[in-house]
Amino acid sequence: MSFSYFESADESTIHVAKDMRDGLQLALGEEEVELSNSNREDAVVGVSPDLLWVNKAVYRAINEIPRSGELPVLYSWFRYGPSVPIHIFHTDNLVPSTLGEYVGNLQDSRSGSSHSIYEFFEFFRDLIRGDDFFSPEQSLSEYLLELYESAPAPYRDLYKNNIKIQQLLADIKKITDATPMTENRVEEYFSKFESIKPRFERSLYEIEEIPEDAEDHIIDFLYLIEDVLESFKEVDFVSRTQQTPINDLWYKYQKHAWPWPANWISHNTSDVNKPAAAEFRRYLDSEITDQKSGWQDEIQGLRIKLRETGVLKASSTRTPLEISSGAVAQIDDAILGDTSSIQTHE
């Protein structure tokens, strides 16, 4: 099943999206922004940094331009934050242009659109000027953690903890067969993991709208990370054949573990009162049904590779515990107390 916003939404809503697109293209052109930073070393899997910024910009326009309420343009919160499932906002379809190149009256709007192209242009221009995203001094992780302050309250902590898991896996991804597994190095990995894991579990289990099978899937991946970290205690170096599946934890987590709960977050945060929302939710239901066995197979395949290369022992198989959010909270408080935010680094 596929989803097309233009086939599902009404004409006036499509016109709002097109006027917004035109204003965004003008702002990008006038501010001489090139959407070409997709090769950043800290890029996430499956979404270019450019598209992350565009999604955030459109999300902010939807919420901030009207004096009250939101513009009737569909968005949801997905893998890495706000996501706009409308093809004209994909970076491949955006063509930056200047005010001098624009043909037409910028003060006009298409039929049914409540704001002019120039209003959208001004909003996006000011956003670009005040945003640190295009500065190489701000890491993508820092950018996302800042963005998540505006995430819907039930999901805010989960998004932050997800990034911290990815930061740890990014560190592990740098391991080579020449990396000494010193006691201090292994302890640093464990310290980060043991700080993040109970908080991740707590933030996940507190969201009732994420089904148990999606929860179990990603918690099982956390157990896999823990087993790999345990294996580091027994070696001085990993072998070259072991390096590949160990490094692959970072990719598999983002591509095959996180998307299952993330799709449910997208389903639950798409406003049912907006045009095309019902069709979009049906599409996500179908996507989850079609993809979940593949997500499970990919993680199982990684586990087999880790076992075949000797990273994991044959006995390193765990079953996710059934634990309530209240129990997780008690464990979290007992272990960590009321500590401040975890400080991590790239």
Image (cartoon, rainbow, N blue to C red):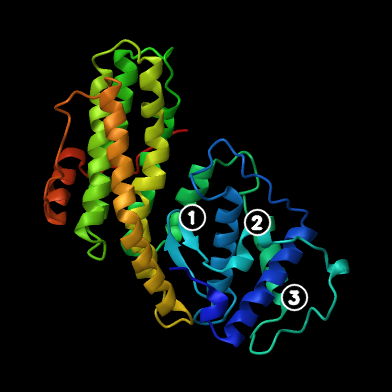
- Give, as a three-letter code, the residue at label 2: Gly
Q: Pointer 3 and pointer 2: residues touching (CB < 8 Å)?
A: no
Q: Is residue 175 above or below residue 304?
A: above
Residue occupying image coordinates x 67% and y 62%: 93
Residue 165: x, y in percent? 35, 40
| Residue identified by numbered label 1 | 147
Compare marks 1 and 3 and give the one earlier in the sequence.
3
Residue 335: x, y in percent? 17, 38
- Element assignment for label 2: helix
- Give, as a three-letter code, the residue at label 1: Leu
The mark closer to the camera, 2 or 1, is 1
Q: Nearer the viewer, residue 114 or 83?
A: 83
Compare marks 2 and 1 and give the one earlier in the sequence.
2
| Residue identified by numbered label 2 | 130
| Residue identified by numbered label 3 | 118
For marks 3 and 2, give the CA distance.
18 Å
For marks 1 and 3, give the CA distance.
26 Å
Residue 256: x, y in percent? 36, 46
Q: Quadrant of residue 243?
A: top left
